[in-house]
Image (cartoon, rainbow, N blue to C red):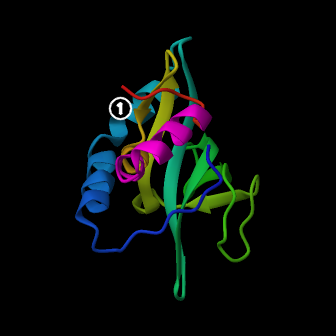
């Protein structure tokens, strides 16, 4: 995962569509997560955390969906107060804003990631792709 924190307006239509699409297809994530094929790895959920004026969407790994609230481990650097990389946190299903996993080396899901990538310049995209732990279709 990239450690870069990217800011978007809460009125960004592309990002809103990406979050809606991720939520609409969340079943795809959980079906693969609960019964992964050998070529499927790196299952992550992205959840929004809010406190006062602070809002951040954070990738979570090692998901425990057998408890409520759900549990996961923060999988990227964060600027959110009192949260840090590798910290175990709880979150509600309504906080989920994206999901992803890698299949045969390619990103599956990652709707918000795809919006961020699409907004990069050609040079930035080349650098981003070179550093990503997966390929894009």
Q: What stretch is highlighted in magenta?
A: 115-131
Picture quarter with the C terminus: top left
The residue lying at 62 percent from left, 60 percent from top is 90
Q: Is the magenta stretch mostly helix, strand or loop?
A: helix
Residue 98: image x %, image y %? 42, 49
The residue lying at 61 percent from left, 57 percent from top is 4
Instruction: Please name whichever residue, 43 or 117, is drawn nearer the observer in this view of the structure.
Output: 117
Instruction: Please name whichever residue, 49 or 79, is drawn nearer the observer in this view of the structure.
Output: 79
Question: Residue 14, located in which quarter of the rendered image?
Answer: bottom left
Residue 60: image x %, image y %? 60, 49
Q: In this view, does 45 lie above or below 55?
A: above
Residue 110: image x %, image y %? 42, 41
Asked if the magenta segment contains residue 56, the reply would be: no
Residue at the extreme top? 38
- The residue labelled by disc 1 is 28
Q: Residues within 10 Å of mark 1 (few under 14, many from 20)?
A: some
2 on left or right of 27: right
Question: Residue 51, located in which quarter of the rendered image?
Answer: bottom right
70 on left or right of 29: right
Asked if the magenta segment contains residue 119, the reply would be: yes
Residue 107: image x %, image y %? 45, 30
The residue lying at 38 percent from left, 44 percent from top is 114
49 on left or right of 9: right
């Amino acid at each position: 995962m990239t450690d870069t924190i990217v800011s978007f307006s809460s009125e960004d239509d592309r990002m809103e569509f990406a979050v809606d699409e991720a939520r609409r297809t969340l079943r795809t994530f959980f079906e693969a997560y609960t019964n992964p094929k050998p070529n499927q790895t790196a299952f992550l959920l992205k959840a929004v955390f809010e406190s006062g004026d602070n809002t951040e969407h954070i990738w979570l790994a090692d998901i425990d969906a057998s408890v409520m609230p759900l549990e996961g481990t923060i999988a990227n650097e964060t600027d959110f107060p009192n949260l840090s990389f590798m910290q175990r946190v709880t979150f509600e299903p309504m906080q989920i804003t994206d999901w992803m996993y890698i299949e045969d080396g390619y990103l599956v899901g990652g709707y918000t990631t795809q919006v961020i990538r699409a907004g990069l310049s050609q040079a930035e995209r080349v650098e981003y792709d070179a550093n990503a732990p997966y390929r894009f279709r």
